[in-house]
Amino acid sequence: MKSNIRNIYSDPAVYDAAHWWKTNDIEFVCDLISKYGDPVLELGAGTGRLAKPIMEKGLSHHGLDTSVEYVAWAKNKLKAFANLGTIDIGDMRNIKLDQTFQTCFIGFNSIFHLMTNDDIESCFNSVYDHLADGGHFFFDMFLPDPSFLHRENIQHHVLDFDHPEGGKCTIKETNDYDEVTQVNAITWYFYRENRAEPDMYNFDMHMIYPDTIFRLLSETGFTIKHVWGDYDKSAMDEDGRLQFYVCQKL
Ligand SMILES: C[S@@+](CC[C@H](N)C(=O)[O-])C[C@H]1O[C@@H](n2cnc3c(N)ncnc32)[C@H](O)[C@@H]1O
């Protein structure tokens, strides 16, 4: 059974279709980049979900992502904006670009794919080195919720969407959280119309807590300017949904 499970980041058409609902960060991210300035570097840029509206505003954008399939898909999606940038293969733990940026960001939980604190530290150092003096770095992720991590071991409903190959699709999930490594191993089951067996995808997320972020940002040398608990800029609190950090290289 395990061998039938695919990596979630191997199928960009499915990702885009399944994330039809994720729009609440777009204007917020575009506004921050307009305020802090381009060129902007996006890490874990994926299928270009955020890159496209950023470029539509005429902002210069360079994205990096480790998924070969996603980068190929994003390049095609963004070809009309080739004068403003593109998305290339690159690892956020070890950025190798001959350029500095006014703004760098990591959107929509992508930082959870840094599996250890050493990985986060490498990423923060790499971002620092690629920011212009005075440049800004922001990122967001959900606030880990113990009641989610320790749920009953059954398949839980996630969402419904129209599958790009046709028909309705319902995603259910199971998760297995390791308290020692703080890694949450998630399996998504895609139940498609008129199919007996679900398509299965997996992905791991390293649950990262605010104390770790504060420590690693300060060790890197960043000045933290804002910590928000949602896209409405409300303060982060332990019952909140989101962790959103804005910091600056001073
Ligand atoms: C949750 S998706 C978010 C994609 C996109 N930022 C968005 O908002 O739709 C996470 C992305 O991070 C990428 N990723 C995972 N590890 C990475 C790494 N070490 N460096 C760069 N990208 C990575 C995955 O390939 C995937 O595209």
Image: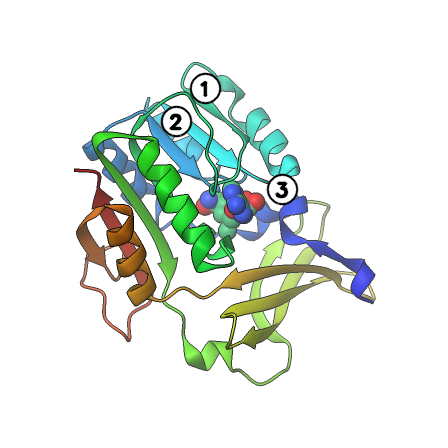
> Which residue is painted at 35% across and 53% down in the image?
140
Q: Residues within 10 Å of mark 1 (few under 14, many from 20)?
A: some
**Residue position for label 3:** 12
Q: Which colour scheme is used?
A: rainbow
In this image, 168 relative to 53: left or right? right
Residue under pointer 2: 61
Residue 60 lies, with reference to residue 134, above or below; the image says: above
Between residue 145 and residue 19, name the one nearer to us. 145
Q: Which residue is drawn at 36% across and 42% down?
A: 125
Compared to residue 97, the image places residue 187 above or below, namely below
Look at the image and tell me in which quarter the N terminus lies.
bottom right
Local packing at callout 3 (Cα closer than 10 Å; few below 14, some 14-19, many 20+) is: many
Q: Nearer the viewer, residue 146 or 233?
A: 146
Q: Mark 3 or mark 2: which is in front?
A: 2
Q: Earlier in the sequence, mark 3 or mark 2?
A: 3
Q: Do the residues labelled 1 and 2 touch (CB within 8 Å)?
A: yes
| Residue 162 falls left or right of residue 236 | right
Task: Answer left or right for 246 relative to 90.
Answer: left
Mark pair 3, 2: CA separation? 20 Å
Residue that extends furthest to the bottom in the rendered view of this protein: 152
Q: Earlier in the sequence, mark 3 or mark 1?
A: 3
The residue identified by callout 1 is: 81
Q: Quadrant of the C terminus?
A: top left
User: On the rendered structure, is 51 left or right of 10?
Assistant: left
Between 108 and 177, the one lying in front of the other is: 177
Q: Which of marks 1 and 2 is nearer the N terminus?
A: 2
Residue at image location 60% in from the left, 67% down from the top? 185
Per the rendering, the mark at residue 68 is none
- Nearest-to-viewer mark from 1 and 2: 2
